[in-house]
Image (cartoon, rainbow, N blue to C red):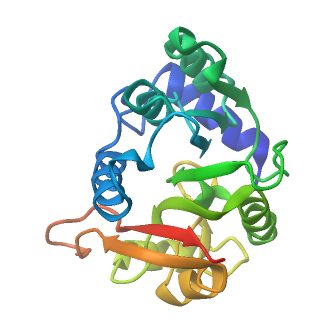
Amino acid sequence: MNKKRLKDFWNKEYKDPEFFALSEKVSADLEKYIRFMQREFGDDVFRPGVFVLDLGCGNGRNLIYLADRFGVSGIGYDISEEAIKQAQKSSAHLGDRVQFAVRSISEPLPLPDASVDLILDLMSSHFLAESEREVYRAEMLRVLTPDGFLLFKSFYAEGDVHARKLVAKHGAGEKNAYIHPRLKVYEYVWTDEAIAEYFEPHFIKLKEETSHKHFSKGRPNKRRSIICYFQKRP
């Protein structure tokens, strides 16, 4: 992954959005996850004392929402200085309970072992190259508590004609990866096999959802995504 190119891209997006509609409201994916977790684990699954790590936090909207609504604490990392600046401004009322810092999620995390109850990865880690994903997984497993949780969302290759074409025409030299022709950044797209190999030895899958089927000429024609609710294996 070209970190400078990625950082420059996201700094520009957060200053003057061109490719993405960036919101300050909590994501619908997180709201749905909260409802599931409360049904399965009780209303107090989110509470003061719970520590949340938001990897690729952007403007901090999801972590700030959890802190405001449930009193959790946590930290968010993002490669974009502009995104972190916005997150710090929006979270000023929370004091030290929530922190945000500029950091690449491809690097080791400056957090103690077994110190995190929930990790959020909502469309962030697909920018990581193969070797970086290995470090990323090892660090997630290290910092998560023995029964900690992971909310994961990323691009999904199955049934996505466009993704297959990107890999075929703009391959990045690694399986299921490409250099985006417009964004000029590395992106990885997950297959069912890759998800099973990467996550299942270390995590229990509580739930999985995929977006619409992709059609090359008909509708819908947006990229497919997959979202998984994981719990760390004992």
> 233 above or below 28?
below
In what quadrant of the picture does the N terminus appear?
A: bottom right
Q: Position of residue 13 (x, y in %)?
A: 51, 30
> 43 above or below 215?
above
Query: Image quadrant of residue 10?
Result: top right
Q: Position of residue 134 (x, y in %)?
A: 78, 70
Name the residue furthest left.
Answer: 218
In what quadrant of the picture does the C terminus appear?
A: bottom right
Q: Position of residue 168 (x, y in %)?
A: 54, 80
Instruction: Residue at 55%, 21% (x, y): give it.
Output: 87
Q: Position of residue 75 (x, y in %)?
A: 65, 34
Instruction: Residue at 47%, 86% (x, y): give it.
Output: 192
User: Left or right: 217 with respect to 130?
Assistant: left
How many numbered circles are shown? Answer: 0
Q: Nearer the viewer, residue 169 or 106?
A: 106
Instruction: Residue at 77%, 39% (x, y): give it.
Output: 4
Instruction: Residue at 50%, 69% (x, y): give it.
Output: 230
Q: Nearer the viewer, residue 129 or 67?
A: 67
Q: Nearer the viewer, residue 168 or 222?
A: 222
User: Left or right: 108 with respect to 167?
Assistant: right
